[in-house]
Image (cartoon, rainbow, N blue to C red):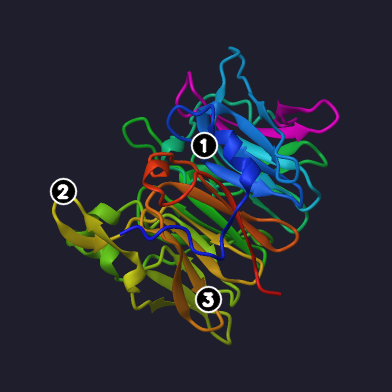
Amino acid sequence: MILGVPSWWELQPKSTSLFESEEHYLSVADTVATDEEIWLARGREGILRYNNQTGEHKYYSIQDERNEPFRNIDILLSENGTLWVLMESINKMGYVALARYNPIKDTFEVITDKSSILQQREMQDNAANYVDSQVLAETDDGKIIMPFAGRLLVYDPMTNMAEYLLPEDFVTPQLNRYYPITAIAISENQVWFTVAKDMDLRSLNLETRELKNYGHAQSILADPNWRSLDMSYRPIAIDGRGRVWMGYFTRLVKDEDGNYSWEQISLPPHFVNRDIERNAYVWGRLRSIYTSSDGDLWFNTPVGLIKYDVDTDSWCNSMPVEEFFVVTEDENNTLWLVLGDKKWLTLGRYSAGIYKYPLQP
């Protein structure tokens, strides 16, 4: 049962005003934070900019060529402070685009690259397969990696050029649809990603362009009794020890020779959820994984926000709530979490709003 918000999460009082005009809840696909501001990608509702010091906020809408708003999927704050948004057209499903915030004009601008790849309207992705908050990534040299047309695409802001990273034959059409890349993580000059068509984990070396398929470990994902978790293999993350996680089920571990092998994880009871319809206890689905600056992992599930501590190899239900939320970290090593559902307000279990939690130094 829901126990309410733990004491280590502090509600920002001024943030509750964001919800006063919301009929039901404040839906959020992803969020990023600085020392003073929080940016929320709100799906079809646009981008919300919130000042956590003054409580002031502003909404931004990004339009396609038909002046219809995009649906925001992922938001990324690069190392140099540039804000990037990956979006999907509401009018044309599968038409995805990349936008960048222009602080001088105080607006978001859709990227049109010199190579004209991002302007393509064919062989687009079904963005419904994306893992929210895990499809935009930045390389060490400031380039943006994203899924596009069934392949990985890299965009260089310095040259305004985009190019595909995966070979053309990687894309396999079926019923006139393509399998999109569903989640991305970058570590040691390698891009790790999952694909919608299978449960395999792949990597691409950014220097040599070597592509490897590591398959997937035999876990509950391969058990037909747990097919309800078929979407939960897509979120991936790299912890502070360089281990590559596939959900909370299994992970790749590198040996002294640099070779990876699968390591099975003893599934923690924190992920057990109750199925109301079947009146049974089941393993909870996974929405996304966030890696904090200390190398710990934060699992976003319907059971709540589950923390994995890499140093102690332990688990903690850090925010035991059942509703959708997103988490991020600012440059001062403070975690920020947005809870949007208002139905629990009348029960006094928690308040809809923005919470913060300073990480231990």
Residue 151 appears in the rendering: yes
Residue 171 appears in the rendering: no
* Gap between marks 1 and 3 measured at Cα: 36 Å
Q: Pointer 2: what residue?
A: 277
Q: Which residues are magenta?
A: 87-115
Q: Pointer 3: what residue?
A: 309
Give the percent coordinates (x, y) of residue 147: 55, 43
Whether label 1 touches label 2, CB < 8 Å: no
* Gap between marks 2 and 3 measured at Cα: 33 Å
Count of marks, rendered view: 3
Label 1: how many residues lie within 10 Å, few (<14), some (14-19) or many (20+)? many
Q: Residue furthest right?
A: 104
Q: Earlier in the sequence, mark 2 or mark 3?
A: 2
Q: Earlier in the sequence, mark 1 or mark 2?
A: 1
Question: Which quadrant would residue 257 be assigned to in this image?
Answer: bottom right
Q: Is residue 278 magenta?
A: no
Secondary structure under tag 3 reads strand
Q: Pointer 1: what residue?
A: 149
Give the percent coordinates (x, y) of residue 197: 36, 48
Q: Residue at x 69, y 49 (%)?
A: 33
